[in-house]
Image: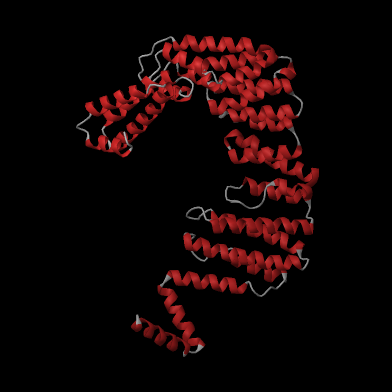
Amino acid sequence: MAADSAHQDLLHGYLAGLDRAALTALLTEAAAADEGLAERLRTAAVRESLRGGSTDPAALARAVATALEPVGPLDRDGARHYAEQVQDAVGLLRRALDGGAGAVVVPLAEQAIVRFGEAVAGADGPSGALSGAADRLAALHLAACEQARPDPVALAEWLAERHLSPDHGRAPSGVAAYAELLGEVGLAAYGAVLGLAWGQQGAGQHALARRMEELHTLRGDTDALVAVLATDLSHPSRHLRIAELLAAAGRLAEAVDWAERGLEAAPGQRTHDAPLMVFLTAHYGAVGRRDDAVALHRDQFLRRPDPAAYRALLEAAGPEGWTGQREWALAELHRRAAVPTARSWENPAGRLIEVLVAEGESDAAWSAAVRYRAPHHALLRLAQLRAATHPADAVPVYRKEVDEQIEAMTRESYRAAVGWILRLRDLYQQLGTPEEFGRLLAEIRGTHRAKGSLLADLDAKGL
C-alpha cells in the first residue's frame, strides 16, 4: 500500500509539472487507446460547452444540437453520460426561458425531444437516467409553450406526430397536459391527425389506442371513447370500463348491457367477474330489473357455491327475499355435500361447512360434518371452535390428531402431539373426568414406550 501511494504521488507530481500542450497531447493519446476514457472526456467537453449561458438563438441551437448527440453507445455508462448531457442542455434552455426567451426555446425544445427520441431508440435497455432526462425535456417544452403560447394548431400537429412516432420515448407529455394551450381548435387538430392514423392502423396499435382514449376522455366524447375501447375486449375489465363510462353519462341500460357482455366473456372467473357482478347488482334496480340481480347471483352461486357467492346472493335478495334465498342456497349445498366424490382431497361438504361457520352456526356445521363424513382436518377445525361448549365432541377428534402427529415420527410432530395431549387434559378436566385422562396418558406412554424423544417431551411438560 505504501508503494502504491508513492507511485500515485510520483504520477501526480509528473502530471502537475506538464505544460498545457504536453498534458493535452498525453490525454489525447490515452483517450485514443481507451474508449471509456475518450467517452468521459467527450461528455465533459460537451457539458462544459453548455455552461456559458448564451441566449443567442444560433449559439443555443448549436449547443443543443451538440448536447443531444450521444458521444458513444448507450450502454449503462453511456446512457448515464448522455442523460447528463441532455440535462445540462435542459438547464441551458431553462436559463434562456427564465430570461423570457420562450419563443426561442419552444422550437429548440422540440428539436431536442426529436433527437432524444431517435437516440434512446438505440439504447441497450431501460435506464432510469434516460427516463429522468425525458421527464425534464417534457417539462421544459410544456413550460416554454406556456410562456410563448405558440399557434395551437401547429402545436397540436407537432404533438400528434410525436405521439405517433415509435421513437418518442417518454417525451413529450400527453395531450391532457397541453389542453389549456390547445383549446378546442387545437384538440380538434390533434384528433384529426390521430384519427387519420387510427383509420389506417386500427385496433392493433395499442399505443395509439391509449392516445385516442386520452383525447376522447379529455373532450368528454363518450361515444368516441366507447368506440375505441370496444376495439379491444380481450379482458372483461374493458367491458366494465365501458359500462362505468356509460353509467356516468346516465345511459344505464347500455351500461348494464356492456357489463352483462363482460360476464359472458369470462364466466366463473372470480377476479374478473366480481367487479362486474357488483356493478350489475348496483344498477339493475335503476333499469327496472331488480329480480335479475337475484337471478344473476343464483347463477353465480351454482357455478361457484362458496361463502362469498352466498353472501352476495343474500345481499342482492334484500330483507324481503333473504329467508327464501338462504333456504334455497343451503339446500343446494346440502344436495352437493351428499354426493360422494372419488377425489380424496376434496370434501364435498366443505363449502356447506364454511358457510355455516361464517354464519356462526357451529352446531349446524358440526352436524353437517358428521353427517357427510367430513375429513379429519375439517372436523379438527370445528372441534376447536366448539371445544369450550362441547368438550365431549372434541375429545375423539383431538385423540385422533395425537395419533397422526405421533405417526409422523419427527421432533416437530412429537412436540405437536404433546400440545394436543395438553388440550385433551383440559377437556377431561372440563368434563369432570380427569381420571380418564390419566388412563389415556398411560395408554399413550405404554404404546409408544420405545419413542424416547416423545417420552422426553411428555416428561418436560410434566405428563
Q: Position of residue 257 (x, y in %)?
A: 67, 20
> Count the marks: how many?
0
Q: Residue 417 vs residue 298: left or right?
A: left
Most foreground residue, 206 or 385: 385
Quadrant of image for the C terminus: top left
Q: Say which quarter of the image contains residue 52.
A: bottom right
Compared to residue 58, the image places residue 297 above or below, namely above
Can residue 119 be seen here? Answer: no
Q: Residue 116 vs residue 400: left or right?
A: right
**Residue sitting at 43 percent across and 24 percent down?**
430
Q: Residue furthest left?
A: 450
Most foreground residue, 111 or 356: 356
Q: Position of residue 261 (x, y in %)?
A: 61, 21
Q: Position of residue 402 (x, y in %)?
A: 32, 27
Task: Please name the colour scheme applied to the rendered image.
Answer: secondary structure
Q: Residue 169 vs residue 319: left or right?
A: left
Can residue 322 be seen here? Answer: yes
Q: Position of residue 231 (x, y in %)?
A: 61, 30
**Residue sitting at 29 percent across and 37 percent down?**
459
**Residue sitting at 74 percent across and 30 percent down?**
248
Compared to residue 289, the image places residue 13 above or below, namely below
Quadrant of image for the N terminus: bottom left
**Residue sitting at 53 percent across and 65 percent down?**
81
Compared to residue 460, the image places residue 237 above or below, namely above
Most foreground residue, 98 or 438: 438
Compared to residue 141, the image places residue 378 above or below, namely above
Q: Say which quarter of the image contains residue 96.
A: bottom right
